[in-house]
Amino acid sequence: MKFLTATDRYIARLVFVPMLSVFVLAASLLVLDKMLKLFDFVATEGGPVSVVFKMLANLLPEYASLAIPLGLMLGILFAFRKLAMSSELDVMRAVGLSYTRLLRVPYMFAIGLAALNLLIVSYLQPLSRYYYEQLQFELRSGALGASIKVGEFNSLQDRTALRVDSSRDEGRDLRGIFARLQTSNGQVMVISAREGRFFANKESPDTVILRLTDGQIVQDGPGIASPRVLTFASHDLPIDLPKIEQFRQRGDADREYFLPELLQIGWNDRYSEEVRNQSKASLNYRLVEVVMMFLLPLLAVALAVPPKRSTSALGVFLSIVLVVAYHKVNQYGQDVASLGRIDPVVALWGPFVAFSALILWMYWKIAYVPGGQPIGALETGFAKVSRVVRKLFERKRLRDEVTPAEEEAAHAA
């Protein structure tokens, strides 16, 4: 017998397309939501726009670990819902194919995506999170060559203030310049210029040259009887770059540790109890999120098949609510376990056992109970609410108004 029959290949096509679509849609929505915040953050810090896309690229593994389980579940759900709505599922069941047999291909997808998700949460996500924090640090410290903020006083040194009216060429070409410099001996120079441009100093890498054009210098201070005014056509102003601090090593937060490192830290007495609790909580959180993927095909099938003669999409809505709510419960369990208030095994694997029992009951109900419907009561209630809502919004018929059915009967007569 063939391991993959034509029916399996047909189910694989039905699962793959919606699974990929949901994955791309979920990841895109998460990225777009974060993109607006990053653009605002980078604009506030005066950094280049390209750093936004670098930061988003480092967030992709974290978003992928959320979008992969959702895409897997909805892909299987939409596939079996289509089979049920077209009565193809009834034919497959009639020829002896059980739900367990039909789940062969979905479980292949689940095993492959679970392995991919384990790789992401074990290695890729900690690395990308560290690089994301590094980009934030470098943006705040000016290591990325942040441009001059327009319309504000920029402190370039402890004794230098610079304000520009407009900026071009990513902050290298400035217009409408006003600068105030104070030397070590107490003298103050106030400089105004029509335009200026930054140039690198080959002799001193820690210093840049601001070449000013068409301006004036007013010099005052101790030992000067009256302020001196100098008009220039071109003037080079050396500016010392601030010293950039080195970013910390990876591992300052539990989210930046690899999975083997969490195992090593969690049961090592050399670390403090707080660090061990955080490591254990992060380890159990990552593992339970991956293990739950093996139960998602059962949940998808249990919620995909609507009652007979019904096109209700309540199962689709309920599946998204259950998965998102379970993910939030895990996040809360990780936070509580990190504080040491509860054991990580209880905080994270307790909800897993309860949710698994619910999923197994729902699958047993749909697969092994004749006419079983795990959410039948919810479907009935949802149908009643839908009828009430339709009555509230449908147009009331006037007394002398003829209904379409009466009009058709009159034409037939």
Image (cartoon, helix red, strand yellow):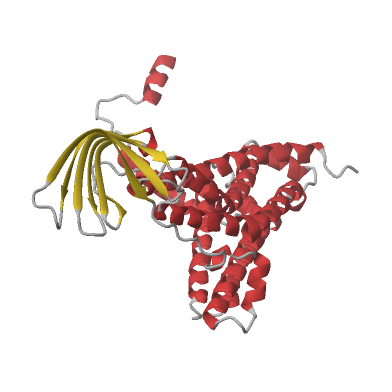
Which residue is at a point 63% across and 67% down the rendered structure image? Answer: 357
Horizontal side, residue 312 vs residue 111: left or right: left
Which residue is at a point 62% across and 51% down the rendered structure image? Answer: 300
Horizontal side, residue 383 vs residue 10: left or right: left
Which residue is at a point 30% across and 44% down the rendered structure image? Answer: 149
Residue 350 visible from this viewpoint = no
Horizontal side, residue 136 vs residue 259: left or right: left
Quadrant (top left/top right/bottom left/bottom right) for the C terminus: top left
Pinpoint residue 196: horizontal percent, then vertical percent. Answer: 30, 35
- Which of 176 and 352 lies nearest the eye of the viewer? 176
Quadrant of res 376: bottom right
**Residue furthest bottom in the image:** 269
Which residue is at a point 46% across and 48% down the rendered structure image? Answer: 205
Is the residue 184 above or below the residue 278 in the image?
A: above
Pinpoint residue 172: horizontal percent, then vertical percent. Answer: 37, 37
Is the residue 357 above or below the residue 372 in the image?
A: below
**Residue furthest left in the image:** 226
- Which of 304 and 215 lies nearest the eye of the viewer? 215
- Which of 299 and 287 lies nearest the eye of the viewer? 287
- Which of 293 and 381 lies nearest the eye of the viewer? 293
Pinpoint residue 84: horizontal percent, then vertical percent. Answer: 64, 41
Quadrant (top left/top right/bottom left/bottom right) for the N terminus: top right
Please tell me how many numbered marks the rendered image carries.
Answer: 0
Residue 242 visible from this viewpoint = yes
Pinpoint residue 95: horizontal percent, then vertical percent. Answer: 79, 42
